[in-house]
Image (spheres, rainbow, N blue to C red):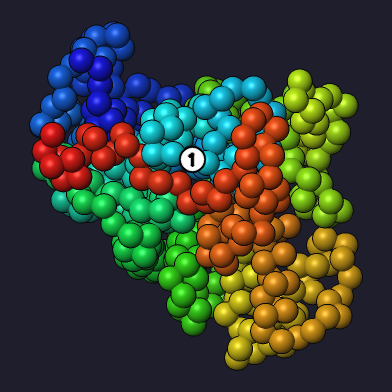
């Protein structure tokens, strides 16, 4: 029997430790002798095998491994979200890639649901990252300060990355599931709404902020800002403008917290660069973004056209497979603050809009200053300032912009058929069929 979706999550949750720049395959310790072909024959376990690596002495490595899982998943999410929202257009003639760009994702599509993060998978990589962070967080909660030096900071880090995984699952998917590992058992959970998932993310962001609140080392301070930004965005998604603005105000305007990348392995590569760079493209920069004439949205005409007439434009935001992708930035914090202040302090809103416009060589905003016009300016600046950083899909859903995407639903799709209007990614069949809470035990 092939490994089920849950098998893969269980193994992946213990799969990689990162140390001295090297990825160590933990799964080889747990499953049959590092022969991956044999693991594909294992029956679905009801209990997770004991793992000697889950020891307090390995706490740093386990947290670092969870971060590595998230960073790979995040890069894949940026590409998938970019294709759905027309930051990118598909250039390859590979049919199971097209539903992202065509906006016709169905729950049985294997690319987004069960592919790994090196192949534009989204659901399984993000769930793997979430379960990995959740598992080490629970262990750290059981271990003591005497067993684990710097335990508070490590626990906050685990909470922060668990929260980010939850946030992206909430923003990008129509609904989701947050199953967990508890005392060696995989505990299946039911389907939850986007708002319920966001509420869970907010809880873990709050725990991360509290965990490093009194710590003054650079890593802890940066993690606190990163968690404040994540919670601000979560609150913005939930419609809590006052809370979002309060959190965003805690983040320095020049702050940048990166999802790191390297060339040590395919999993560590910058996924956007691999998808689109000056040497060739699998995804080409979309026409709306090519027309912005903004130095924050850089691209290059490669002078090539594929068999159906799609032209190749490479993104230049990321210049190498080792270039980091911004996860949390002061630019986003400022724009969240600007949105929160529209009704109460529009002068601050306009000042922030003008500061962002200056970065795009746009000049001072001289248009109407009513709430709707200022919000439209914020949405436009988010599109420019946060290009290819994983925000646009959440923005399209939050601001209900699906109907304004170009090409519009019903327009001809280059590879056949027409564009659809499926913006949020549906809960995959791989979850429904393998989760006994959803499948009725079958």
Q: Position of residue 326 (x, y in %)?
A: 60, 49
Specify whether residue 21 is in view: no
Quarter-of-image position of residue 322:
top right
**Residue shown at the point (71%, 87%) measured from the top left:** 370
Q: Position of residue 92 (x, y in %)?
A: 66, 24
Residue toward you, 102 or 301: 102
Q: Position of residue 254 (x, y in %)?
A: 67, 63
Instruction: Tell me the crowding category of disc 1: few under 14, some 14 to 19, or many 20 or more residues within 10 angstroms, Cα based.
Output: many
Residue toward you, 149 or 224: 224
**Residue shown at the point (67%, 67%) measured from the top left:** 379
Q: How many marks?
A: 1
Q: Is residue 372 above or below residue 198?
A: below
User: What residue does disc 1 label?
Assistant: 105
Q: Quadrant of the N terminus?
A: top left
Q: Is residue 111 above or below residue 352?
A: above
**Residue shown at the point (88%, 26%) measured from the top left:** 303
Quarter-of-image position of residue 348:
bottom right
372 vs 399, left or right, is right
Residue toward you, 418 or 189: 418
Residue toward you, 410 or 67: 410
Q: Position of residue 8 (x, y in %)?
A: 29, 28
Q: Quadrant of the C terminus?
A: top left
Specify whether residue 405 is in view: yes
**Residue shown at the point (62%, 43%) measured from the top left:** 419
Asked which secondary structure carries label 1, the reply is loop
233 vs 29, left or right, is right
């Amino acid at each position: 029997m092939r490994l089920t979706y849950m098998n893969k999550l269980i193994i992946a949750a213990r799969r990689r430790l990162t140390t001295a720049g090297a990825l160590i395959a933990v799964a080889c310790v747990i499953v049959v002798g590092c022969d991956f072909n044999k693991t594909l024959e294992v029956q679905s376990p009801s209990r997770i095998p004991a793992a000697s690596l889950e020891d307090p002495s390995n706490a740093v490595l386990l947290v670092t491994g969870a971060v590595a899982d998230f960073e790979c998943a995040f890069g894949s999410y940026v590409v998938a979200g970019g294709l759905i929202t027309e930051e990118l257009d598909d250039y390859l003639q590979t049919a199971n890639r097209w539903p992202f760009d065509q906006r016709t994702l169905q729950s049985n599509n294997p690319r987004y649901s069960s592919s790994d993060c090196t192949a534009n998978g989204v659901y399984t990589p993000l769930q793997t990252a979430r379960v990995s962070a959740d598992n080490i967080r629970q262990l750290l909660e059981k271990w003591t300060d005497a067993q684990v030096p710097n335990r508070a900071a490590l626990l906050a880090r685990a909470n922060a990355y668990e929260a980010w995984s939850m946030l992206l699952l909430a923003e990008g998917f129509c609904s989701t599931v947050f199953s967990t590992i508890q005392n060696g058992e995989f505990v299946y959970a039911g389907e939850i709404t986007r708002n319920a998932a966001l509420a869970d993310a907010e809880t873990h962001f709050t725990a991360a902020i509290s965990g490093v609140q009194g710590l003054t080392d650079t890593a802890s301070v940066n993690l606190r800002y990163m968690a404040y930004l994540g919670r601000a965005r979560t609150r913005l998604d939930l419609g809590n403008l006052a809370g979002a603005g309060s959190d965003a105000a805690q983040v320095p305007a020049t702050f940048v917290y990166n999802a790191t990348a390297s060339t040590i392995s395919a999993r560590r590569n910058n996924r956007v660069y691999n998808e689109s760079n000056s040497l060739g493209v699998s995804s080409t920069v979309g026409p709306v973004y090519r027309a912005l004439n903004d130095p924050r949205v850089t691209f290059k005409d490669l002078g090539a056209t594929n068999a159906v007439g799609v032209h190749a434009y490479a993104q230049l935001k990321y210049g190498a497979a080792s270039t980091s992708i911004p996860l949390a930035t002061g630019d986003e914090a400022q724009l969240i603050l600007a949105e929160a202040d529209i009704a109460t302090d529009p002068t601050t809103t306009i000042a922030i809009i003008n500061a962002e416009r200056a970065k795009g060589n746009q000049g001072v905003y001289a248009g109407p200053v009513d709430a709707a016009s200022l919000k439209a300016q914020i949405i436009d600046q988010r599109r420019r300032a946060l290009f290819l950083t994983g925000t646009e899909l959440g923005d399209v859903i939050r601001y209900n912009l699906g109907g304004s995407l170009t090409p519009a639903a019903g327009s001809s799709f280059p590879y056949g058929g027409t564009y659809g209007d499926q913006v949020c990614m549906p809960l995959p069949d791989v979850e429904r069929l393998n989760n006994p809470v959803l499948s009725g035990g079958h």
